[in-house]
Image (cartoon, rainbow, N blue to C red):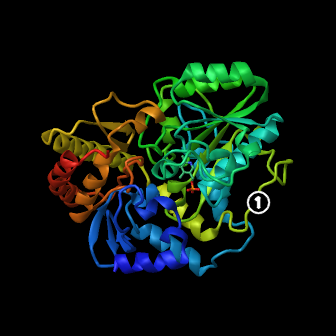
């Protein structure tokens, strides 16, 4: 069935998928066509059930189809799918975001705008930064992914890494020329870029902790240094928490790093994934002074027919309200448990590897090089060990991200039964990784 569905999909949809990584390009084989999901499990078109460590790339933090989220969505849908007008609930969600992104007595998000995708959130944040500073240049880091808008596709991690593309065709050279791409975790490179172009740089955008080239956490102090340097030169900082926000903790990665006192304060944040609870919803937020430059208050235009969609808002609100400290503790403990089990199984088979962590996000890096701190190092790993590992897990009913350059996601619904299934699958998968043959 999966096979036939994929054949058929390719006749009407480019590559048979609506987002490239789903095509299994980097692991080979036929993607599973999913028909339903509940808790930690997904079920494919052939009725096979898998323990899921993709979690829709993050949103399913409570587990799939959490009954309370589903009920909230149903109730909202009954009242109307979309109005194209303001609703009371969207203000509640904005207020909740403002309240949650707090650490050491500070609340850096003073205003929020809801959009439909993370790509829109980062795109708008950049336009805002350019509008606020009157400058054009943007600094990003190699291997960081911020969605698929033109300015942000340069050396953008997983999706493009998986396809082995440097960027994307169709991006005008003039647009790419406004993006400076720097090596991650390299303060000297940031200093040098600002020394040369400081007066023209509108903003630095960075993932709060990089998790789209596999997981590569910022070196201690790196995020704070980036803020310090940008500030010195009058540039803004956009902290992209589309993936990490409300996932690694209630106040995101920023909250984890600043819990003992605000070491750095981004001008703008972007959120997505968890904030929509599985529905198309994302957000940007930040300092009132900057956010109020958005239309209709200010001169920076942004709009959306489905922005603040009531059904999506219901899913996001309910998800955030249910994501309490107990949920985050469970995610951390579950990530520890799985990461340890993966590591033990690989070690037993003599497979050199490392586990990369950022809060409850983790990924495996193959080979015996030291823990990579940037994209170039990540790409030097023995990536060819992953496809056989991935497929051995899949055959035994565990669904991992179909690329070594993606983070693994746990949920509050991963219980002992789910973890035992993962444990049971690991020995074979580790053996497959050990027996993998390097390409010529
Ligand atoms: C997923 C992601 C995006 C893009 O979000 P979409 O909703 O897929 O457009 C942007 N930034 C980061 C860090 C992401 O992980």
Residue at 71%, 32% in the rendered image: 236
Q: Is residue 103 above or below residue 319?
A: above
Picture coordinates of residue 261, whole percent (x, y): 53, 25
Residue 322 in view: no
Quadrant holding the N terminus:
bottom left
Quadrant holding the C terminus:
top left
Q: Quadrant of residue 420?
A: bottom left
Q: Nearer the viewer, residue 69 or 125?
A: 125
Q: Is mark 1 within 8 Å of ligand 1?
A: no
Residue at 38%, 80% in the rendered image: 4
Left or right: residue 252 compared with residue 368: right
Residue 43 in view: yes
Q: Is residue 160 above or below residue 78?
A: above
Left or right: residue 408 compared with residue 336: right
Picture coordinates of residue 389, whole percent (x, y): 25, 52
- Most extreme residue toward the front, as rendered? 440
Residue at 66%, 58% in the rendered image: 115
Residue at 79%, 45% in the rendered image: 292
Q: Is residue 202 above or below residue 147?
A: above
Left or right: residue 348 compared with residue 418: left
Callout 1 secondary element: loop
- Most extreme residue toward the right, as rendered? 299
Q: Nearer the viewer, residue 168 or 54?
A: 168
Q: Quadrant of residue 92?
A: bottom right
Picture coordinates of residue 359, whole percent (x, y): 39, 39
Picture coordinates of residue 374, whole percent (x, y): 47, 32
Q: Nearer the viewer, residue 56 or 212?
A: 212
Q: How many marks?
A: 1
Q: Residues within 10 Å of mark 1 (few under 14, many from 20)?
A: some
Q: Which residue is mark 1?
A: 303
């Amino acid at each position: 069935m999966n096979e036939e569905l994929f054949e058929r999909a390719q006749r009407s949809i480019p590559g048979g998928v609506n987002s490239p990584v789903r095509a299994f390009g980097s692991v080979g084989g036929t993607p599973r066509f999913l028909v339903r999901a509940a808790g930690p499990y997904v079920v494919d078109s052939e009725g096979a059930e898998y323990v899921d460590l993709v979690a829709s790339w993050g949103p399913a933090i409570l587990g799939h189809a959490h009954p309370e989220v589903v009920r909230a969505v149903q109730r909202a849908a009954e009242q109307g799918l979309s109005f194209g007008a303001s609703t009371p609930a969207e203000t509640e969600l904005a207020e909740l975001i403002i309240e949650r992104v707090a650490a050491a007595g500070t609340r850096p998000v003073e205003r929020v705008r809801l959009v439909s995708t993370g790509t829109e959130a980062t795109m708008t944040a950049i336009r805002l930064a350019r509008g606020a500073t009157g400058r054009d240049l943007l600094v990003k880091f190699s291997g960081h992914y911020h969605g698929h808008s033109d300015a942000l596709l340069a050396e953008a991690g997983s999706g493009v890494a998986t396809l082995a593309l440097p960027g994307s065709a169709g991006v005008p050279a003039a647009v790419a020329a406004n993006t400076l791409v720097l090596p991650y975790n390299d303060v000297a490179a940031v200093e040098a870029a600002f020394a040369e172009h400081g007066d023209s740089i509108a903003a630095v955008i960075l993932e709060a902790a990089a998790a789209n080239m596999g997981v590569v956490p910022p070196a201690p102090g790196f995020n704070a240094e980036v803020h310090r340097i940008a500030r010195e030169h009058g540039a803004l900082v956009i902290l992209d928490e589309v993936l990490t926000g409300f996932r690694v903790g209630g106040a995101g990665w920023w909250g984890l790093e600043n819990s003992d006192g605000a070491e750095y304060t981004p001008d703008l944040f972007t959120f997505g994934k968890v904030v929509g609870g599985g529905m198309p919803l994302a957000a940007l937020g930040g300092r009132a002074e900057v956010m109020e430059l958005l239309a209709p208050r200010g001169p920076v235009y942004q709009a959306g027919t489905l922005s603040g969609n009531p059904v999506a808002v219901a899913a996001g609100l309910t998800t955030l309200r249910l994501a309490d400290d107990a949920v985050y503790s469970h995610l951390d403990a579950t990530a520890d448990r799985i990461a340890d089990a993966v590591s033990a199984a690989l070690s037993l088979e003599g497979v050199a590897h490392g586990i990369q962590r950022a809060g409850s996000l983790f990924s495996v890096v193959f080979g015996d090089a030291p823990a990579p701190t940037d994209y170039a190092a990540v790409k030097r790993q023995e990536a060819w060990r992953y496809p056989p590992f991935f497929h051995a897990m899949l055959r035994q009913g565990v669904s991992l991200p179909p690329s070594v350059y993606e983070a693994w996601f746990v949920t509050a619904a991963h219980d002992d039964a789910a973890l035992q299934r993962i444990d049971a699958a690991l020995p074979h998968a580790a053996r497959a990784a050990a027996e993998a043959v390097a390409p010529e």
